């Protein structure tokens, strides 16, 4: 029995000193708050074991100091473990202050004891009270620390949960070993063997918590690893959007590190893919961890405060995942660029086809009419008198002018559809520009009332403004009744211009089709000279300029068209 106890003591001595060295090296590598308290706690435990090797000379003053120092380290150990377990998030202030005070009182009490009795000496009442308080202190701190780790570990991924549970179990076992050590201090009995055996099991559990073997990590990580492998495999199949890539991979990646949210950011810090990231991205008891990705960028993880300590290897796995996701996102971007180019080509082809169809359809009538008149002049010219020839000539001029206007409008539409018209804002005197447009477009400019303040300057495209206002003023006289008002004002970096007539306005049932191409109301179709393209062209110019053209009924009657154009920088 004596041999077994001694053997276990020496094994525990080596194991606890090694544990202190391991936690110290972990602290050297990480230099954060949890590892600092771990190094202090388990370094003190290893130091306690080393002090136990000093030969005991009963009655010697130095021996009494050595014993008290060892006991003080023993008193402090559970408090240091408590500080380690609560280094991840702030503990309850009242509980923390109470435990600190109890630990400080017990340390002072230890050095104030008149004498530390040996194993065979009589224990005074004062010493018995001290032992009772010591065990209460140790048990209370151990229970709080173990329960804190165990309960917090429930919400963690498998690896972190197992490590935290191993640490909680180790704290509980070392407390039980201490309880068994008290009645066995007088000999080498089965209680002593049990105490040393529990101490050995606890140190093994401590090693599993701080430095678990790689094989054990793989076994623990198996559930999340399986899902992660499925996610990585899914990257091989084609995804069309960045959101689809994120949905496939980032959720499983969050599971493996116990993250509430995860995102991939480019080198400029802009998120290119994310999972479950809220607008404010703020939670209590959450730590933001950034993992660098090879090739630039980072993976941003909103995870529990325990993950960086108990799941550091899992966080490193995200680097590999980030590289794979980066490749998948590059593939998506290439696909989207190719898709946009293909859509642009298809749209250009559709514009060309539509233009040819529209041109053929709309030019057929004037061309047929012109052809008929020309044939008449060619075949029957000698039978026509001067008045008939003049009528045919006037009809030819009218139809050729209509055809020229239609060709110009069709070309405008084709350029607008193909986005080939360049908008070049420049400073324009709005009133003088409107006056010039009216004098060119209208036979009797006096019928137009221009309500534009003098020296109203706007930074707009002159050509777009001319095309839009010309169409609106011409339509106002063609389909409305004079007088016509043109009003304009410059507000909130926009030019707002309206053209209003005094006619009957637009029939309510025709308003939805008002800006459609080649659509004319029943009343408008009776008016000669229209093509059904003017309003479509005017709105297309307005939208090409980044603005819009809208219709509303004028009061008490009439039609009012409102143009809103943003003013660009000169």
Image (tube, grey):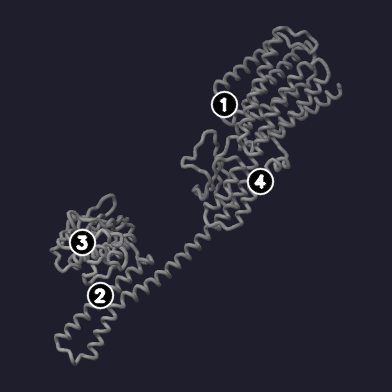
Q: Say what secondary structure mark 2 lies in.
A: helix
Q: What residue did someone put label 1 on?
A: 91
Q: CA distance from mark 3 to mark 2?
A: 25 Å
N-term-proximal mark, 1 vs 2: 1
Which marked residue is nearer to the observer: mark 1 or mark 2? Answer: 2
Number of other residues with Cα within 10 Å of mark 1, as a class: few under 14, some 14 to 19, many 20 or more = some
Q: CA distance from mark 1 to mark 3?
A: 74 Å
Most foreground residue, 181 or 454: 181
Which marked residue is nearer to the observer: mark 4 or mark 1? Answer: 4
Q: What residue did someone put label 3 on?
A: 434
Q: What residue did someone put label 2 on?
A: 402
Q: What residue did someone put label 4 on?
A: 225
Based on the displayed image, in which of its 4 quarters is residue 181 positioned? top right
Which marked residue is nearer to the observer: mark 3 or mark 4? Answer: 4
Side (left or right) of 358 relative to 131: left
N-term-proximal mark, 3 vs 4: 4
Based on the displayed image, in which of its 4 quarters is residue 401 positioned? bottom left
């Amino acid at each position: 029995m004596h041999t077994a106890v001694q053997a276990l003591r020496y094994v525990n001595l080596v194991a606890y000193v090694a544990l202190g060295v391991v936690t110290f090296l972990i602290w050297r590598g990480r230099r954060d708050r949890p590892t600092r308290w771990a190094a202090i706690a388990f370094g003190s435990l290893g130091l306690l074991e080393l002090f136990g090797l000093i030969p005991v000379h009963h009655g010697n003053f130095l021996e009494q100091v050595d014993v008290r120092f060892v006991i003080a380290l023993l008193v402090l150990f559970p408090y240091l473990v408590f500080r380690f377990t609560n280094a991840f998030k702030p503990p309850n202030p009242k509980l923390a202050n109470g435990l600190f005070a109890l630990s400080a009182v017990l340390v002072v009490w230890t050095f104030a004891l008149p004498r530390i009795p040996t194993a065979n000496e009589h224990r005074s009442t004062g010493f018995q009270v001290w032992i009772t308080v010591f065990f209460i202190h140790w048990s209370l701190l151990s229970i709080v620390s173990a329960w804190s780790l165990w309960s917090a570990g429930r919400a963690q991924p498998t690896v972190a949960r197992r490590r935290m549970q191993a640490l909680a179990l180790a704290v509980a076992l070392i407390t039980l070993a201490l309880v068994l050590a008290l009645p066995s201090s007088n000999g080498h009995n089965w209680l002593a063997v049990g105490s040393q055996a529990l101490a050995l099991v606890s140190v093994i559990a401590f090693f599993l918590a701080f430095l678990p073997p790689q094989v054990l990590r793989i076994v623990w990580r198996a559930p999340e690893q399986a899902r992660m492998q499925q996610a990585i495999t899914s990257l091989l199949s084609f995804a069309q959007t960045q959101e689809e890539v994120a949905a496939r991979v980032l959720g499983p990646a969050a599971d493996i590190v116990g993250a509430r949210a995860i995102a991939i950011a480019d080198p400029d810090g802009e998120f290119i893919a994310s999972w479950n990231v809220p607008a404010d991205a703020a939670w209590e008891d959450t730590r933001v961890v950034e993992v660098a990705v090879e090739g630039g960028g980072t993976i941003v993880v909103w995870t529990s405060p325990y993950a960086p300590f108990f799941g550091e290897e899992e966080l490193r796995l995200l680097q590999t995942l980030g590289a794979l996701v980066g490749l998948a996102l590059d593939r998506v971007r290439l696909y989207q660029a190719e898709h946009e180019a293909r859509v642009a080509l298809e749209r250009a082809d559709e514009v060309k086809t539509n233009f040819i169809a529209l041109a053929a359809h709309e030019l057929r009538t004037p061309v047929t009419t012109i052809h008929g008149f020309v044939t008449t002049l060619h075949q029957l010219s000698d039978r026509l008198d001067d008045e008939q020839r003049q009528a045919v000539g006037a009809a030819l001029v009218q139809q050729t002018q209509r055809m020229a206007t239609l060709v110009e409008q069709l070309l405008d539409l084709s350029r607008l559809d193909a986005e080939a018209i360049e908008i070049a804002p420049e400073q324009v005197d709005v009133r003088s520009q409107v006056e010039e447009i009216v004098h060119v477009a209208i036979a009797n400019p006096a019928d137009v009332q221009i309500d534009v303040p003098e020296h109203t300057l706007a930074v707009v495209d002159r050509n777009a403004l001319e095309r839009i206002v010309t169409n609106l003023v011409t339509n106002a006289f063609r389909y409305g009744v004079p007088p016509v008002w043109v009003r304009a004002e410059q507000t909130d970096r926009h030019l707002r211009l309206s053209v209003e007539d005094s006619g009957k306005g637009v029939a309510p049932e025709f308003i939805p089709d008002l800006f459609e191409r080649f659509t004319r109301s029943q009343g408008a179709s009776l008016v000669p000279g229209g093509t059904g393209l003017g309003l479509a062209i005017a709105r297309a110019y307005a939208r090409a300029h980044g603005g819009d053209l809208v219709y509303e009924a004028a009061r008490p009657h009439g039609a009012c068209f409102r143009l809103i154009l943003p003013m660009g920088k000169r």
